[in-house]
Image: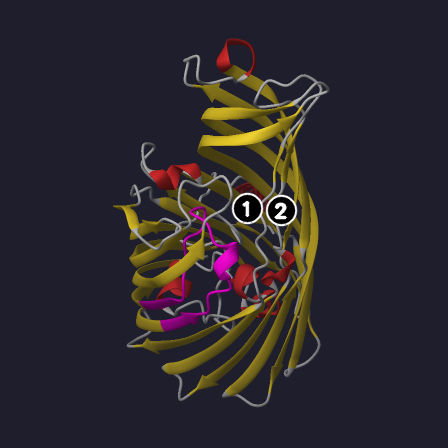
């Protein structure tokens, strides 16, 4: 093997650009072919993106390959806000803030039995933005989670039927949360209980690295039928962030000092573990069908509690917190993908995915205003002996979501509706 190619492959996988997902929390858009098939792409031949979709299938790669993928996601949606009597007090829409899901992959066949692969791709990410002057901004007017997982993987092919893989996961999370504070609250002091008026803006920004692992196995019944399973572990992040509080620069805003507060914030978030179960059927040498079910244990996302080391209302010796119960439920995502090869060089793909909403009424917010999702997608691929280029288009119907307001929100309930996401993706792969 050419050592320069190996170094280039590792660099491409490890130095993936910063990414941000859109209209959701879990990201499944790891390659153009995967987008085209609705995420049901666990058994692809000669595809380096198998590192992400199904590590056991990197045993289907011949030789040495590198791949890069860029997926554009553009979320759109509307909302209505209601007071305690159920009266509508505001309607609006999100600020269109598109995101990118970027994937880089490298796979090398060591011998007839062993393979090595590494990928850098987002498993969890999101970005959402709303008008700063809206009442929705008291919940969140800008939220961004940049995420990337680096997954060095070893795979072994035992015989014609069995293959398996195991890998580590180095998971990076960069979190930024901005919201308006417009509320009154009682504050206990050593002398008295006073009513503090909070009128300003807070920004929390930090990052964290944590470790996880994954394992996968494939079994081929015959030349036409194959099943596979992938497990990805949960990952616990202890986030240390910078806290910035900006007052309105008026006497009504009692934020400390010159109406601004600068300190630290702390929080713990557990990203969920998941199971993928897939089935592949080849009708003939040209056409195949994949089915995939994903179980994600979202119940690990039970709260997003942030603790401050300083008081936002300027009371010495007292530090507030920002508790936010989530209590999401475990959920399923189902996908079906079809691939047809017109010739040795040209192929077409289509897919559909159905993703349950795991967000309860009292655990929703404007960070992730996502309901039940249906994704429709198509794509095409060109390949020769050395190169593969694929493109895909998708449309995600995000559905509706009703959720309750929190104690600090300027509304009692919210209704997100007519939400959708536009998706476009391109991938390039080269064999060496």
Viewer-proximal residue among 328 and 390 = 328
Q: Is residue 327 above or below residue 135?
A: below
Q: Are marks 2 and 1 in contact (CB under 8 Å)?
A: yes
Residue 39 appears in the rendering = yes
Kindly state the secondary structure of the residue where label 1 is placed: strand
State the residue at coordinates (54%, 77%). Answer: 278
Task: Calculate the distance from the C-alpha at mark 2 to the C-alpha at mark 1.
Answer: 6 Å
Q: Is 95 displayed left or right of 61 in the figure?
A: left
Question: In the picture provided, is 209 more to the left or to the right than 200?
Answer: right
Question: Which residue is denoted by mark 2 in the rendering?
Answer: 171
Residue 68 is marked as none
Residue 363 covered by magenta stretch: yes
Crowding at mark 1 (Cα within 10 Å: few <14, some 14-19, many 20+): many
Q: Nearer the viewer, residue 261 or 188?
A: 188
Count of labels in the image: 2
Query: 350 above or below 305?
Result: below
Which residues fall within the magenta stretch?
Answer: 352-376
Could you tell me which residue is drawn at 36 percent across and 53 percent down?
A: 85
Task: Tell me the element at label 2.
Answer: strand
**Residue 157: where, in percent of width, then height?**
67, 73
Identify residue for label 1: 148
Residue 294 among those drawn in magenta: no
Quarter-of-image position of residue 62: bottom right
């Amino acid at each position: 093997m050419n050592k320069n190619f190996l170094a280039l492959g590792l660099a491409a996988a490890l130095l993936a650009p910063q990414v941000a997902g859109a209209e959701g929390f879990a990201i499944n858009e790891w390659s153009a072919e995967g987008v085209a098939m609705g995420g049901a792409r666990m058994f692809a031949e000669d595809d380096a993106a198998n590192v992400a979709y199904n590590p056991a299938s990197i045993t289907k790669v011949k030789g040495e390959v590198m791949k890069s993928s860029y997926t554009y996601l553009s979320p759109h949606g509307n909302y209505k806000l209601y007071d305690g009597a159920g009266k509508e007090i505001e309607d609006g829409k999100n600020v269109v803030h598109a995101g990118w899901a970027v994937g880089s992959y490298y796979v090398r066949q060591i011998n007839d039995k062993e393979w090595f692969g590494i990928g850098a791709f987002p498993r969890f990410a999101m970005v959402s933005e709303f008008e700063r002057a809206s009442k929705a901004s008291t919940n969140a007017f800008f939220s961004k989670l940049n995420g990337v997982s680096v997954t060095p993987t070893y795979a072994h092919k035992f015989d014609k039927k069995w293959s398996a893989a195991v890998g580590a996961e180095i998971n990076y999370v960069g979190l930024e949360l901005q919201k308006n504070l417009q509320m009154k609250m009682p504050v206990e002091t050593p002398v008295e209980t006073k009513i503090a008026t909070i009128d300003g803006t807070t920004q929390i920004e930090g990052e964290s690295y944590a470790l996880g692992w994954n394992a996968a196995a494939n079994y081929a019944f015959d030349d036409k039928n194959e099943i596979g399973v992938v497990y990805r572990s949960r990952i616990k992040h202890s986030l240390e962030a910078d806290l910035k509080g900006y007052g309105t620069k008026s006497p009504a805003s009692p934020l400390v000092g010159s109406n601004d507060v600068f300190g630290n914030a702390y929080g713990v978030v557990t990203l969920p573990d998941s199971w993928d179960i897939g089935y592949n059927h080849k009708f003939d040498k040209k056409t195949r069908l994949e089915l995939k079910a994903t179980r994600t244990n979202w119940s690990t996302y039970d709260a997003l509690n942030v603790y401050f080391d300083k008081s936002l209302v300027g009371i010495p010796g007292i530090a507030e917190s920002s508790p936010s119960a989530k209590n999401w439920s475990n959920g399923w995502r189902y996908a079906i993908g079809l691939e047809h090869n017109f010739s040795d060089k040209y192929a077409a793909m289509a897919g559909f995915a159905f993703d349950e909403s795991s967000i309860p009424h009292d655990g929703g917010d404007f960070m992730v205003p996502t309901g039940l999702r249906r994704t429709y997608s198509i794509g095409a691929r060109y390949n020769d002996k050395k190169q593969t280029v694929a493109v895909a288009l998708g449309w995600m119907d995000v559905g509706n979501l009703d959720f309750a307001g929190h104690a600090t929100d300027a509304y009692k309930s919210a209704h997100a509706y007519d939400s959708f996401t536009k998706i476009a993706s391109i991938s390039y792969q080269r064999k060496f």
